[in-house]
Image (cartoon, helix red, strand yellow):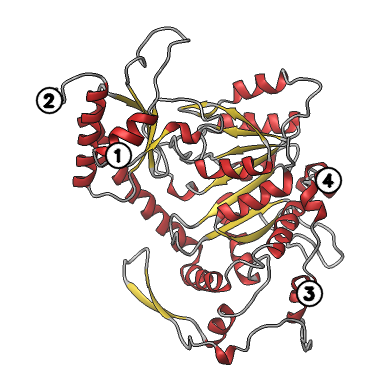
């Protein structure tokens, strides 16, 4: 049963908000043909009934825990406030639970904790027309949501440049990806409005907009409040859903106050239920544990969980129980203290990287200072890129980065891979998350030599 349904199957919560929540029938045209053909796994659909008091289950072919070789688990957890390292153990029951199958939606106790986190972070309470499911990282959930909504030929608006990892997801479905540009203030809402208002009358309008609103990968840009409100208005007017992919929400280190998420903002909109939010704790707790969750209207959650039943059965129980033990041990306030420390760590890494960019790339590249995330997005001043006129060929970073830079021992990504169209661009993405200062300096020194050689200038300059 949904987390926002009472025992009679009715929504409960703020009546003024619930009157604005879109009904289940609204999502019928948004559900893909593939999803409509999916059927429930008959075993997985009944697994929650095993938790009913008094039920003796002969249902699932679960292996006997007596045969599992792991008999105890203890780990050390750093306290975010005191920096003290505290030993934490899984109880016998927690360990037994972690090593066994669990539901496709996620471990109920963890789902409850994450629902509480959404209230803590975004002011969204249970009972407001949304639900939550856990996944094997947010990418797993994005893939399933995209498949749940889009058919071949459907149009998807894609904030571009975009995280290169999602382009294959839309491509495999056969969706038409329409790029929506942006600037230092975020997504280009004005351009998006013009595109939608001049849409061909004989062509169905886009079903979704995919956006990374905080520390956009690759640009590092965080969309302003004004841009977000414009996009929400356009979503209502032109009837599309917003796929809010937000892995860098907790890595915001901009000087201005953090703008509210789309998920938070839509609570006060005339309609509630167009935002499908993807969260990740991979960047702040562990990338290898693959901690992702989706917050979305119930029909979308149901479609994603059905996909999980048909594909990987469930997200790993071990990851979920371990995550829950850690999160409950900290609580929401200590998690916030931890992510604030992590954000400050990356702010320092950013500042070191940018200082060395000024030293080695001043006059050879242009960039905006990222406000979140792990990346610099910079434009190389290559031959032709400084020509005047709108039609001037601004050059292409592809050969410079993939060939010359690599031959000089520097590995980065050319900007073309972040455009669904594959168009040429002089932009480059570089990560500042890992390298120590001396390696950053050497990498940028080598890149300077490559750019100077490409420009036909002496490297000694």
Foreground disc of the pair 4, 1: 1
Q: Residues within 10 Å of mark 1 (few under 14, many from 20)?
A: some
- The answer for how far apart the CA atoms under marks 4 and 2 are is 64 Å
**Quadrant in which residue 453 is drawn:** top left
Residue 132 picture location, percent across and down = 66, 58
- The answer for how far apart the CA atoms under marks 4 and 1 are is 49 Å
Reading the image, the residue beneath label 3 is 46
Residue 454 picture location, percent across and down = 27, 23
- Sequence-wise, the earlier of marks 4 and 3 is 4
Reading the image, the residue beneath label 2 is 460
- Sequence-wise, the earlier of marks 1 and 3 is 3
Q: Are marks 1 and 3 in contact (CB under 8 Å)?
A: no
Reading the image, the residue beneath label 1 is 406
Foreground disc of the pair 1, 2: 1
Reading the image, the residue beneath label 4 is 28
When the figure is inspected, residue 95 is found, relative to residue 29, above or below; the finding is: below
- Sequence-wise, the earlier of marks 3 and 2 is 3
- Sequence-wise, the earlier of marks 1 and 2 is 1
Q: How crowded is mark 3: few (under 14 residues within 10 Å), some or many (20 or more)?
A: few
């Amino acid at each position: 049963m949904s987390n926002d349904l009472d025992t009679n199957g009715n929504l409960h919560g703020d009546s003024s908000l619930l009157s604005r929540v879109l009904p289940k029938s609204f999502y019928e045209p948004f559900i893909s043909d593939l999803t409509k053909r999916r059927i429930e796994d008959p075993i997985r659909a009944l697994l929650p009934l095993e938790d009913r008091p008094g039920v003796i289950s002969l249902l699932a072919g679960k292996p006997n825990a007596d045969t599992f070789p792991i008999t105890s688990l203890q780990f050390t957890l750093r306290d975010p406030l005191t920096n003290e390292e505290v030993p934490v153990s899984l109880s016998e029951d927690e360990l037994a639970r972690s090593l066994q199958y669990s539901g496709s939606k996620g471990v109920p106790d963890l789902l409850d904790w994450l629902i509480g986190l959404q209230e803590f972070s975004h002011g969204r309470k249970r009972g407001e027309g949304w639900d939550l499911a856990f996944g094997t990282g947010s990418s797993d959930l994005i893939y399933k949501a995209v498949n749940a909504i889009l058919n071949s030929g459907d149009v998807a608006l894609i904030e571009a440049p975009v995280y290169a990892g999602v382009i294959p997801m839309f491509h495999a479905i056969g969706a038409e990806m329409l790029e929506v540009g942006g600037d230092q203030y975020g997504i280009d809402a004005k351009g998006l409005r013009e595109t939608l208002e001049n849409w061909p009358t004989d062509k169905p309008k886009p079903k979704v907009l995919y956006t990374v609103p905080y520390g956009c990968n690759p640009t590092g840009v965080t969309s302003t409040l004004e841009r977000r409100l414009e996009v929400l208005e356009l979503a209502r007017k032109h009837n599309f859903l917003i796929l809010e992919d937000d892995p860098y929400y907790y890595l915001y280190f901009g000087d201005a106050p953090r703008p509210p998420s789309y998920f938070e903002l839509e609570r006060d909109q005339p309609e509630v239920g167009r935002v499908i939010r993807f969260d990740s704790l991979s960047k702040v707790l562990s990338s290898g544990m693959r901690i992702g969750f989706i917050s979305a209207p119930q029909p979308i959650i149901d479609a994603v969980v059905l996909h999980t039943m048909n594909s990987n059965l469930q997200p790993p129980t071990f990851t979920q129980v371990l995550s829950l033990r850690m999160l409950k041990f900290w609580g929401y306030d200590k998690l916030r203290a931890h992510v604030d420390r992590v954000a400050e760590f990356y702010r320092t890494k950013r500042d070191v990287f940018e200082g060395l960019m000024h030293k080695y790339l001043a006059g050879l590249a242009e960039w905006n200072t990222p406000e979140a995330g792990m990346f610099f997005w910079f434009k190389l001043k290559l031959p032709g890129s400084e020509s005047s006129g709108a039609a001037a060929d601004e050059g292409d970073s592809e050969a410079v980065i993939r060939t010359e830079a690599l031959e000089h021992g520097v590995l980065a990504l050319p900007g073309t891979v972040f455009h669904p169209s594959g168009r040429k661009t002089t932009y480059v993405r570089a990560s500042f998350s890992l390298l120590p200062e001396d390696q950053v300096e050497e990498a940028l020194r080598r890149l300077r030599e490559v750019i100077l050689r490409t420009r036909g200038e002496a490297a000694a300059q």
